[in-house]
Amino acid sequence: MEELSATNAPGEGIRLGFDTYSIRDFHWKDGQLLDYAASLKLDTIQFSGLEAYESLEPAHLAKVKDHAQRLGISIDAGIGCICPLSSGWNPQEGNPKDYLLKGLRVAKAVGAHSMRCYLGGFGDRPNLERCMEATIQALRSVRSEALDLGIRIAIENHSGDMQAREAKMLIEEAGKDFVGSCLDSGNPMWVVENPLVTLETLGPYVVTTHIRDSAVFEHPRGAAAQWVALGDGSVDFRGFLELYQKLCPKASMQLEIITGRPPTVLAYLEPDFWKVFPRAQAWEFARFLALAKSGHPYMGAMVIGGSGKQPPVIEAALKEQQRTDLERSLEYAKKSLGVGVRWKS
Amino acid sequence: MLRRTFLQTASAAALARGANASDEGIRLGFDTFSIRDFHWKDIQYLDYAAGLKLDTVQLSSLDDYESLDPAHLSKVKEHAERVGIVIDAGIGCICDLSKSWEPKQGSPTAYLRKGLGVAKAVGAHAMRCNMGTRADRPNLDRCMEATVKSLQSVRSEALDLGIRVAVENHAGDMQAREVKALIEEAGKDFVGSCLDAGNPVWAVEDPLLTLETLGPYVVTTHIRDSAVFEHPRGAATQWVALGDGSVDLRRFVELYRKLCPNASMQLEIITGIPPEVVPYLDRDFWKVYPRTPAWEFARFVALAKSGHPYIGPMVIGGWGQQPPAIAAAMKEQQRTDLERSLEYAKKVLGVGVRWKS
């Protein structure tokens, strides 16, 4: 690992943390997650789902806030899908407005200033315009509450639901005074988008993030991409950080490390692939092509599980890997990119 | 003896004869290295092979035996006959100039004799061994000479015992052309090939070319598939379960039936190792391949151009000590990848005799 001095570190001054999804199989709750973040000398953490809390009772959330303050960890909050037309919508949440309000209250109670949420997934792209309209409507329905509570709602480019240009349009349409971006640097793969294009487009709106690396490489059907630990992939993170410094230096860099999944083929050489990208721009796609041409498959060790339920020994190995890959990614962010504040003191 | 038992034993004995008629089909089995982390011994391996309705097993190392006492080996032979499994025997490195040579074996002649004695005792007609690894290529000529000498030192014993010594193309030590030269120099009346279908990709060789070259000498095998694909430095390769890779196995089996139908097809499935770069675009790479013909290399280039990386699930650790959770997952994977490879060999390639009956 190439280590940097503070003077040439592109990540200087950017707060470092992680999204709790990175270590989901540990089933830790708020207090444990905060202690773990503090033990790694991090600055921040993203509780990206309400299940990260032991309880949503105000008294408990007040304790979480106190504990975070005591440890010096700032919390970014989060909820899930807010589009009732999406296949990812959970009807148990009642309606999007109630769900958003619930999330905003939790966020406020733990002292967060941002709350991540998302529209849907790749499966929603055939119905994208209607989903975007419904999401905008849901967001606008809580505008006054969000502004009163001082919380920016951060829409994630999630699981191939939107390209950056589309997420930007949604943010502007909903109202950029209370809606921003939870920029995910891994999901652009599923929409044949170079993560640097994502950052260039969404940078001015970024409130919080999900940062991970991807190995991207050419494949007979187009390209293939696999999420990997930071530094193991094809993304130019030095260039990414230089741009981050310019566009959104105050946004916390939350690593969301997801390894253990096989590469996904992006069959852009097949005409059917483009049916759900009717307005994708050629110049943007060319940036992805260049990335795929410059990359190669990940050649290191990784436990790669299959789809569905895994045998217990494979599950145990995947769980172990979640922690080791997150920790080595954090080390890379600190030592090679110079990201993070607290670990330097 | 009950009539049923007699018939089972008779049928097993028929199967256990050294050579099978080519119209019977290719015998299917596995090399015990495929499931090394289970640390099983001879009888367990034989029972496992029989449970999978296989025809043969390669006990590729002396460590595979519970004991090397003649009484125990005799029991192993009887058990193999009873369960209808033909044993191919095996030992390790026989070149005392190789970096892999184990001095505790005394001398190559003594080690070969020990292996031949064990092979005979368990009823084997073939004994696999190897020269070295790719680390020996800078010193290849001298290693080959030493290996030929070792082999020739046990010629009369091997012929008397009726055992062919099968030299493997092992871990990138030799290309097929070199193995063929070694076999012919040592004496093809008692030396043959343990054809490994995975190791050629470490030596920039298309496994089909390996089979074309060594086919007439093949006595036993190590069969596995490899994902081969282009890489900025040349190509990269990864060993995968049968059917998951880039090798045209249907053509491979077609050629196998023509060239060596009596050789047992022993699957040696090795997964869990990351892809390995074969940097043939770097000039230095060629220092250890001074005599490789371009036409042979071109076959490998074509294979790499046609392939792509393996993109399925796999626990990828490495060769060394792994954290306990990863080691447990890799152990489990050894068995599942061997079993699905055997299924592929049976159902897709039509290999094996016993499972069809």
Image: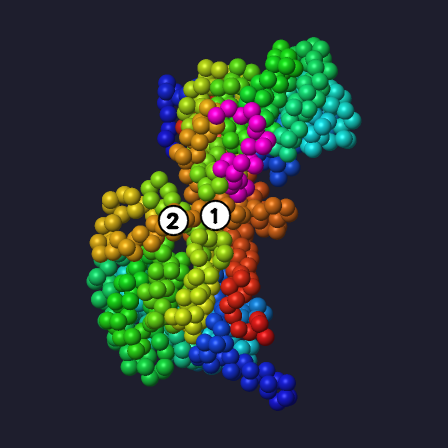
Q: Is residue A40 left or right of residue A127?
A: left
Nearer to us in this view, A99 or B240: B240
Who is closer to the viewer here, A88 or B13?
Answer: A88
Residue A68 visible in the shown view: no
Looking at the picture, tell me which residue is in the foreground, B256 or B46: B256
Q: Amino acid at mark 1?
A: Tyr
Q: Residue at left 59%, top 82%? A: B8
Q: Is residue B189 magenta?
A: no
Question: Is residue B318 positioned above or below A277 on the image?
Answer: below
Q: Which segment is the magenta one?
A: A261-282
**Pointer 1 residue:** B310
Expressed as whole percent of the image width and height from the top left, the position of residue A184 reads: 55, 27
| Mark 1 residue element | loop
- Subunit bearing disc 1: B
**Residue type of the residue flagged with mark 2:** Ala
Contact check, label 2 and label 1, Cβ < 8 Å = no
Give the CA separation, mark 2 to mark 1.
13 Å
For label 2, the residue is: B304
- Determine the residue positioned at 57% across, 72% down: B356
